[in-house]
Image: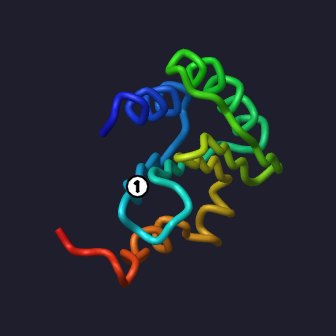
Amino acid sequence: MSHRIDTIVKVLDDKKAENIQAFDMRGRDYIADDVIIATTLGAKHGAALLDYLKPEIKKLGESVLHTDEADEWIVIDLGDMLIHLMSPEHRSKYNIEEFLSYQRKPENSEEI
């Protein structure tokens, strides 16, 4: 994993996010190169995780381009990376990791 992903995963882990997964989507038919998904302990925990992540992302020389915040799901857009902070219920319901695992390479790309 890259230093950036390692740093984000460490912050999430240190602040008690659960079931943290990182997906390398490079060469896949997806809108971002990397995706991180973590389960929160609740709405306040998700908001706190976002607050903890923002200064760490800034230290990496990155900018948060946009956040979409709801009680059950927060999406943090770094341009080439998306971070999903989800309640256990939403994580189970939407099962994004399965969707990401099945994203295929575009038909005109070559296998390496």
Q: Rate crowding at label 1 as few (under 14), some (14 to 19) or many (20 or more) other CA atoms within 10 Å.
A: some
Is 93 left, or right, of 12 in this rendering? Answer: right
Give the residue at x 61% y 27%: 53
* Total count of labels: 1
Residue lying farthest front? 108
**x%, y% of residue 21?**
43, 50
Give the residue at x 36% y 64%: 27
Instruction: Pick the quarter of the image with the C terminus.
Output: bottom left
**x%, y% of residue 63?**
64, 29
Is 5 left, or right, of 50 in this rendering? Answer: left
Amino acid type, residue under disc 1 in the picture:
Phe
Query: Against 39, is 1 above or below?
Result: above
Give the residue at x 40% y 68%: 28
Q: Which residue is mark 1?
A: 23
Is 23 left, or right, of 17 in this rendering? Answer: left
Give the residue at x 64% y 72%: 93
**x%, y% of residue 36?**
50, 48
